[in-house]
Image: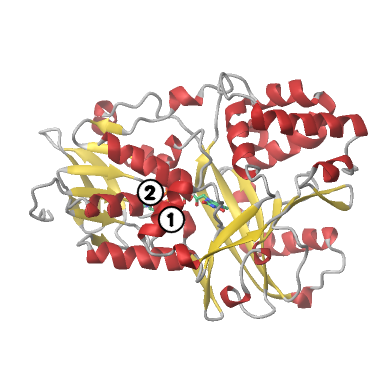
Amino acid sequence: MQSVPSSKLPHVLILGAGISGLVGALRLAEKGHPVTLVEGSDQLGGLGTFFQHDGRTFEKFYHCMLPSDGPLLEVMETLGLTKDIYWRPSSFAYAGGGSIYPLNTPVDLLRFGPLPFMDRIRVGITGAWGRVCSDKGLDEITTAQWLQGLSGKRAFSTFWQPMLEAKFGDRFQDVPALWFWTRFNREKGESKGEVKGYVRGGYKRITDTFATRLKALGVTLRMNEKIHKIDLDATGHPFVETDTGELRAEQMLITLPWPTLQTLATDAFKQRADVPDWNIDFQGVINHVLFLKRPLTKHYWLATPEREHPFDGVVETSTLTDEADRGQGRHVVYLTKYVHRTDPRFNQPEEEIKTSWFAALQKIFPDLRQDELEADYLFRAPFVEPVYTRGFLKKRPPEVLIPGKVALATTAQVYPVVTSWNGSVIQAEKTLGAM
Ligand SMILES: Cc1cc2nc3c(=O)[nH]c(=O)nc-3n(C[C@H](O)[C@H](O)[C@H](O)COP(=O)(O)OP(=O)(O)OC[C@H]3O[C@@H](n4cnc5c(N)ncnc54)[C@H](O)[C@@H]3O)c2cc1C
């Protein structure tokens, strides 16, 4: 059994060192709490972790910030990183019927060939209405119902449905309209055109700065220590079992992905915890990262929702990042696919995915040659965000699981805010307020 540091404030054991755990540790340690942060992997940052290539680090899953990410930007300020964030105009395009259509302005929409003219107008009205309408009641109706009502059945099935299917597969039917409304308003919230931000040195710079700051505040970082069980002892006090033994503290803050908590929590723990519904399923993702010797497009995001493409989007992060952060003449492209961990595609052998996805990319860009590929990498994450269902607001797990003892800050609670580092910061701060 591990010893408990001495302090007047309760010692908090934080499970998981993604952005939620890192922000939790930072804010608690700033207040003077003794904090122990337990992380199963050898990196801080969870879904924002990195890999190395040619002397630089890159995110395993594409990451950027938006000007509307206020709470995250405040954390960047606390870390002294504001001066190192740079912003670039960003654009979106849609690959359909063999062409690439920019979709950033009303004029782009009027030129959008895959839709009949009247449907373009209705999609435009949907967008304009989506920005001004209230979100009241949208959790209770599905995105499909809401968008069909606004854009019409044909525009829905040609334009919106493939994008929803790309994200949720055949479970898109039950996704609440509130999810769509928030996402739409976050990404299109800029009146002067879309802008995205990145930090000099990449997201590793952020997690390295966290590590330095947390150590200076006296936080104990226990890396490579996997948690196997979350339980309650005979007195009702929570503890965890890890690779090295038992860990306990006066309070516990859980930031593990929800399905992991579902698996690790014992029945005794689940019975005490105040959770409306343990059955929240999660969507996974595959990212195929390509280092190219040439650019593909000028767009940060190219949606490829048509069924013939094995991925949902081509995210060209080098339209945002400086050469200093990626290497001279190197263009970085992420092919991304949301897919459930039980889908055979999630477990397809790495080389099969790499070969078939690159061939599919060449169909969109027929002049892309194999010798223009410098290197590529593949990453998978089983737990990215909930498969939302109607009425999800009532399903969201609470901030406090066991009063005075166990609190929760995880992606399953972030809704209707978009799952993102910003959403996790908002949630972590809300949870700390409730602890
Ligand atoms: C493809 C993709 C693109 C994205 N793009 C963006 C973007 O552009 N901008 C943005 O802001 N966000 C983006 N996100 C979302 C963002 O990464 C997540 O919302 C956020 O990282 C969630 O943080 P978290 O700390 O709650 O969870 P996680 O990051 O999942 O962290 C959980 C932590 O718990 C640890 N853990 C799990 N099991 C155990 C165990 N048994 N024992 C010990 N430790 C354990 C994990 O190793 C991990 O460190 C993206 C995500 C993906 C997948």
Q: Is residue 80 left or right of residue 280?
A: left
Quarter of the image that includes the C terminus: top left
| Residue at horizontal 29 percent and vertical 64 percent from the top | 213
Ligand 1 within 8 Å of disc 1? The answer is: yes
Q: Nearer the viewer, residue 404 or 298?
A: 298
* SS for dot 2: helix
Q: Are marks 1 and 2 in contact (CB under 8 Å)?
A: yes
- 258 versus 37 height, above or below: above
Type of residue at label 2?
A: Ser
Type of residue at label 1?
A: Gly
Q: Which residue is mark 1?
A: 46
- 330 versus 290 height, above or below: below
| Residue at horizontal 38 percent and vertical 23 percent from the top | 276
Q: CA distance from mark 1 to mark 2?
A: 9 Å
* SS for dot 1: helix
Q: Which mark is residue 20?
A: 2
Where residue 50 appears, as percent x and y from the top left, is: 49, 66
Q: Is residue 353 left or right of residue 285?
A: right
Q: Is residue 187 left or right of residue 365?
A: left
| Residue at horizontal 67 percent and vertical 76 percent from the top | 330
Q: Residues within 10 Å of mark 1 (few under 14, many from 20)?
A: many
